[in-house]
């Protein structure tokens, strides 16, 4: 197959709150927890998620709102424009089967707490693709695509010690429309190094394991690894800018070529973005 412009699953920026990068001075008392509501809006040169293109290499508008309770509980919603579902449209002997889905809405909630110097984060995340028609490909006669509705639910747990964060996510539904993929996992390690003067350098490595896709539908399977190196700059007044080099080991896997245009969703790229938080 080639649905491929996806396994999408946002740059950790989509639904993961930023972790603290520095500890308070030894003599300073820790700040009391606060209940907050924060809004964000931004634009990126293209939307990449777990290394894979979500917008066919085109810019994306993104934004969200996050609520954090003083007791450690949090809720949030985040949205982005996408193109990967439309890219899954197919043509078989001249019989074109178009599918659509223009937006991704992530709804998430969880709980953070500290224990023995480690910050833990557990929660659930729902990826909602409003009005997506991905399942139409699977129901079209003459097509051998093993697909259904793209909406996906994951549970996750993360642990942060110093500048390092290890996160584990597991799909409790089928993953982004792939049938028989419930139980697929993503594990990643990210570091956030404070470089001074408002700069942060964040290397990242992740492994997406996709269950139930090593078959005639997807020769070679859909599991892969992704890598990125992001430089972020706090511009002040709620404005931040990022530039990221993104790579995967799936760039030569034909499963990640767009059905519609043969665009390679797994190829190396550089992504720039700007975000305003208020």
Image (spheres, rainbow, N blue to C red):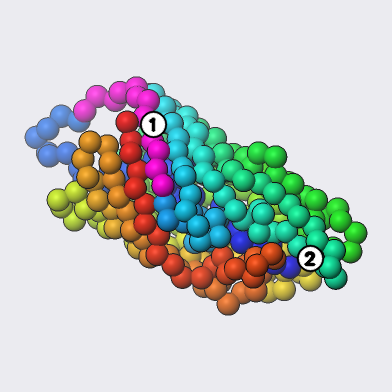
Secondary structure of residue under mark 2: strand
Q: Residue 75 versus residue 257: which sits nearer the camera? A: 257
Give the image quarter of residue 265: bottom right
What separation in Å lies between label 1 and label 2 (alpha carbons)?
Answer: 41 Å
Secondary structure of residue under mark 1: strand
Query: Is residue 151 visible to us here?
Result: yes
Q: From the viewer's perspective, is the residue at label 1 or at label 2 nearer?
A: 2
Residue 160 relative to residue 25: left or right: right
Span shown in magenta: 31-43
Magenta span main SS: strand
| Residue at x 69% of width, y 64% of height | 260
| Residue at x 59% of width, y 43% of height | 103
Sequence-first tag of 1 and 2? 1
Query: Is residue 172 visible to us here?
Result: no
Q: Which residue is mark 1?
A: 39
Q: Quadrant of the C terminus?
A: top left
Q: Residue furthest left?
A: 27
């Amino acid at each position: 197959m080639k649905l491929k412009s996806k396994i999408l699953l946002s740059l950790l920026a989509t639904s993961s709150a930023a972790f603290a990068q520095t500890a308070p001075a030894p003599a300073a008392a820790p700040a009391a927890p606060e209940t907050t509501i924060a809004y964000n809006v931004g634009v990126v040169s293209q939307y990449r998620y777990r290394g894979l293109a979500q917008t066919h290499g085109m810019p994306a508008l993104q934004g969200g709102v996050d609520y954090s309770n003083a007791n450690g509980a949090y809720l949030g919603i985040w949205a982005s424009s996408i193109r990967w579902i439309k890219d899954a449209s197919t043509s078989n002997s001249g019989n074109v089967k178009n599918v659509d889905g223009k937006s991704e809405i992530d709804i998430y909630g969880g709980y953070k707490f500290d224990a023995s110097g480690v910050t833990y984060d557990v929660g659930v995340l729902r990826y909602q693709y409003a009005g997506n028609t991905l399942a139409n490909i699977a129901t079209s006669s003459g097509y051998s695509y093993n697909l259904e509705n793209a909406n996906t639910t994951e549970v996750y747990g993360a642990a942060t010690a110093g500048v390092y964060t290890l996160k584990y996510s597991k799909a409790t539904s089928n993953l982004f429309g792939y049938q028989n993929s419930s139980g697929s996992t993503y594990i990643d390690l990210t570091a956030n190094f404070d470089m001074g003067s408002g700069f942060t350098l964040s290397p990242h490595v992740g492994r997406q394991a996709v269950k139930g896709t090593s078959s005639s539908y997807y020769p070679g399977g859909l599991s892969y690894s992704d890598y990125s190196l992001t430089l972020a700059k706090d511009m002040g007044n709620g404005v931040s800018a990022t530039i990221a080099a993104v790579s995967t080991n799936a760039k030569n896997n034909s499963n990640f070529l767009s059905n519609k245009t043969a665009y390679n969703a797994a190829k190396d790229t550089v992504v720039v973005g700007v975000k305003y938080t208020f």
